[in-house]
Amino acid sequence: MTERDTSKPAIETALIHHPYRPPAAFDAPQPGVFKASTVIFANTAAMRARDWKSKAGYTYGLHGTPTTFTLEERIATLEGGTHTVLVPSGLAAITLTDLALLKSGDEVLIPDNAYNPGKELARHELARWGITHRFYDPMDANALAAMVTPSTRLVWLEAPGSVTMEFPDLPNLVRAARSQGALVALDNTWGAGVAFKAFDLGVDVSAHALTKYPSGGGDVLMGSVTTRDAALHLTLNAGHMRMGWGVAANDAETVLRALASLPLRYAAHDRAARTLARWWAQRPEVVQVLHPALPDSPGHAHWAALCTQAAGLFSVVFDARYSVAQVDAFVDALKLFKIGYSWAGPVSLVVPYDLKVIRPKAAWHGTLVRFSLGLEAVDDLIADSEQALTALMR
Ligand SMILES: *Cc1c(COP(=O)(O)O)cnc(C)c1O
């Protein structure tokens, strides 16, 4: 066997350690996608000087890449905050907030109409770790003021409540939470940074399911935790790092691509939802339409004091004379509305809920159906709803 000339690398090596570097001056409408677990340091001095807390450099894929830093900065701007960390889902944004800010012996207060998986986290993991919780009525700020104690470390807000859509008096809830020094975290998924500015209300943390409007496609799971306070961000970021929650570059890129059209999509979903909600308000089959922009929806005045826009989401409560099976038949008869959780994508979605199970103390009885408006023509969605109602009568 002849000796290989080692003055030139073998093909295996050359394909890995190729000398070509594309010119750095490249620009395009979309930022590049940088995929990395390993981040390469120029030398040992650079490696030793690394600082995972600083966005001036890179340490490891989990701690940030140009792609995730860019998305974090844009989400911070969307929310009106200064610092954002990305997590693998909206639920993980709630989890990170709880785990980074709470310790054994602390109490967290959660609205009784909040996104249910966040309540389940409190009932199970938080409880096992000695973090207590109570659920409060978000429509009664005085009751919250009476509930907070010095051991209340964190108060969650959500506006409006998941599924039942009551819009709370956010400024007074923040005041009540603050009265004993608790931190305030808002689940800002519905407002999406568009309907109202969370940090102007004095919240400390905004958790956002980027899965919804920022992605807008029904094809990405991601969440963010945003603050306007450097020390609080450091606490969240350190917890984020130690718990090892990264997001994939391709997912970050998908959200970056969709973010530019978020305000336009939000307005379109809003218009469609209000049109269909008003149509439902005229229907004799339902006793209540729950959409914060409708005058007789709970908390409408609080919504109107803060917002002109609303997400493309509403619920209707069917008259109690209709059985669960009849309402299920209506849902099954819908053709354009698909049965599925989540929202804010192009496809309209519908989910039936039993009010007795999700809100035993609610003022209404019967079966609730939640609609998430996609981007189809609203006339077609009205026609679909109307034809499906014939299934209710069978
Ligand atoms: C969807 C949603 C979440 C969770 O988001 P995932 O990315 O699905 O985990 C949290 N809060 C609210 C209000 C949501 O609607």
Image (spheres, rainbow, N blue to C red):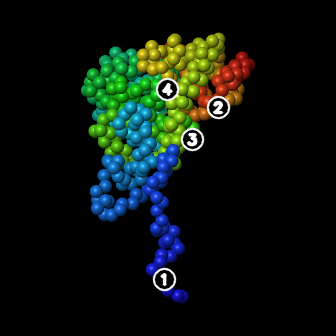
Q: Earlier in the sequence, mark 2 or mark 1?
A: 1
Q: Look at 37% across and 30% down and name the residue there.
A: 185
Q: Residues within 10 Å of mark 1 (few under 14, many from 20)?
A: few
Asked if the residues shown at circle 4 and circle 1 are in contact, with their CB atoms under 8 angstroms apart, the answer is: no
Q: Quadrant of the N terminus?
A: bottom right
Question: What distance separates the C-alpha of mark 4 from that of mark 2?
Answer: 19 Å
* Disc on res. 219: 3
Q: Earlier in the sequence, mark 2 or mark 3?
A: 3
Which residue in the protein does label 2 denote? 338
Q: Which residue type carries mark 3?
A: Asp
Across and down, in percent, residue 308 comes to 48, 20
| Element type where label 4 sits in the image | loop
Callout in the foreground (3, 1): 1
Asked if the residues shown at circle 4 and circle 3 are in contact, with their CB atoms under 8 angstroms apart, the answer is: no
Query: Is residue 315 depicted above or below 229 in this figure?
Result: above
Which residue in the protein does label 4 denote? 162
Q: Earlier in the sequence, mark 3 or mark 1?
A: 1
Q: Nearer the viewer, residue 381 or 319?
A: 381
